[in-house]
Structure formats: structure tokens, C-alpha cells
Amino acid sequence: MHGSRISTCARRGLAAVVAAGSLLTVLTTATPAAAGSASTPVGGSEVVCTSKQPGLAPVLSQDIADALHGREGASALAIYDRRTRTHCEFKAGAHFDSASVVKVTVLAALLRQAEEAHRKLTPHEVRLTTAMITKSDNDATTALWRRVRPAGVQHFLSLAGMRHTVPGPHGAWGLTQITAGDQLKLMELLTTDNRVLTAASRGYALDLMHRVVPDQRWGVPAGAPGGASVHVKNGWLPRKTDGWRVNSVGTFNGGGNDYGMAVLSTGSHTMDDGVATVERAARVIHRDLTH
């Protein structure tokens, strides 16, 4: 009888230990997930971040929200960082007029067409694509848009999974409807192995984005770390309604960096105001990802 009581107590103690251990397991597995995501409200929406680096998501979401708070007009952004496995979004599904950032899509669509035809770009196409990306030449873009055709652009968009992008009507490539989420997909596509564009095509596109003329290197490069190779394309367009459209997309690679971002804006009173909105967000993103 005495031995039976000892056995019962032992079983109860073991059960308690097992229960405590199970609770500890639940708590330790739940804590990293909770620490890896955060959202901060701004302007009726939320900046949502996830990260595998402890403490980064709440800092980044708060800093982005602070940067965008009170800015004129509307904005959206999306970022990825492969090193810390971080993603952030703010109204990433909202549509904006593309202005000249669509030129990267036009280039990618042309490169895809050339791959499917098993050919290299012609010398004329090289001249046009160089002018289109490095100088944001509109005539070169119009010529390439006609060459690729909206159907060719749509073909590339489908392959790239950019399902929310709508090519501009009647040749108005600058009115292509884009989202920050789709633009980020394009930046990710250009910087990783995939079945849509070969390494040679991706390298060609990134080289042109790296050689953008100095007076067009504003926007997302603001605050970029010195050791990173910067690839950028900007777009700016004034319209009679909702003011200036100012957009900027880019990737930052090398020196231990491997991330990209897309920041879109509309409704700024001046171009400088739109640039300031983009650069306020870009600076805190660079700072938080690299420090």
C-alpha cells in the first residue's frame, strides 16, 4: 500500500513535469513567430513587416510609418531583404500610374522575347534599351513598346507573376497601372535564378540600372550603404488630377547586402515633394536593414 502511494505520487509528479515541458515548448515555439512580425498604422492603413532577425520587424514597421506619416498624397511600398529574410508591405496592392518605372518591365519583356526567339538584342535594340534605362528616354521607350507590343508585355507579366499590372492603353506606356508588390516581384526576379530570364538577361538589365545618369539617381538610393552596388529606375509624371506621380524602384547587392524595394507615390504638389516622400522611406529602410 505504501509502495502504491509512492508510485501514484511519482506518476503525478511526472505528469506535472510533462505538462510543464509541453507548456514551455509551446511558449518557446510561439515567441519567435510573435517577435518576427509587426504592424504599425499610418494614414488608415498599416505597415506590415516580417523578419527572421529578432527585433527588426517592429523597428522597421514603426520607422517606415513615421517616415510616411503626414506626407502629402498617397504612397505605397514593398521591400525584401534576403539576408535577414525580411519583407515589408504598405498598400502594396494599390494601383498607381507607372510613369517611367515601367521601362524596366519593357526591357524585361524585350529580353524575354529575344530569349524565346533564341537571338541576341540587335545593335539598334541595345542603343534603344540603353537610352531608355540610363537616360529615361521616352522616344526610345515608345519605339520599344511598339516593338514588344502590349501582348508581349502581358506575356512577360504573366510569366513573372505580376498579375496586378495592367499595360497602359493605346500606347500610353506611362499610364500602365502598377503596384508596389508587383514591382518588388520584378526586382526579385532580376536578382535571383529563375525560368523567366536567363542570367545574361538579368545581368544586362541590372547593368543598365547601375549606369543610370547621375541626375536620375535619386529616390530609393537615398541612404544606401557605401558597399552596395545600386540599381535604380525612377519615374515622374505630372497630371491635371492628383498632382505628381513619383516612383522609384531598385536593388542593392554586394558588400553583404541583398535587398530591394519599390516606393510609389501620387498626389504630391511638386516633384520635389514626391521625391522627398520616397527618400524619407528609403533612408530608414537602408538604415534599419544595414545596422
Image (cartoon, helix red, strand yellow):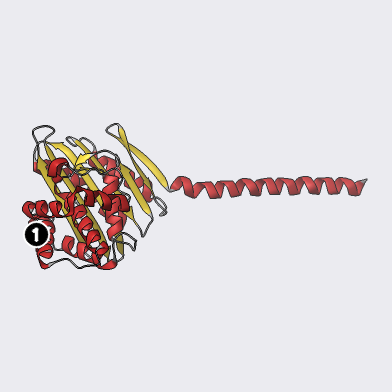
State the SS at label 1: helix
Q: The C terminus lies in which quarter of the figure?
A: bottom left
The residue closer to the viewer here, 83 or 129, is: 129
Task: Measuring from the top left, give residue 280's x and y in whole percent.
Answer: 20, 46
The residue closer to the viewer here, 270 or 69, is: 270
In the rendered image of this protein, does residue 80 appear above or below residue 244?
A: below
Q: Residue at x 42, y 54 (%)?
A: 52
Q: Give the amino acid at mark 1.
A: Ala
Label 1: which residue?
A: 131
The residue closer to the viewer here, 28 or 268, is: 268
Q: Residues within 10 Å of mark 1 (few under 14, many from 20)?
A: some
Q: Residue at x 37, y 40 (%)?
A: 39
The residue closer to the viewer here, 12 or 252, is: 252
Q: The N terminus lies in which quarter of the figure?
A: top right
Q: Which picture quadrant has residue 226?
A: bottom left
Task: Measuring from the top left, give residue 125's x and y in whole percent.
Answer: 12, 62
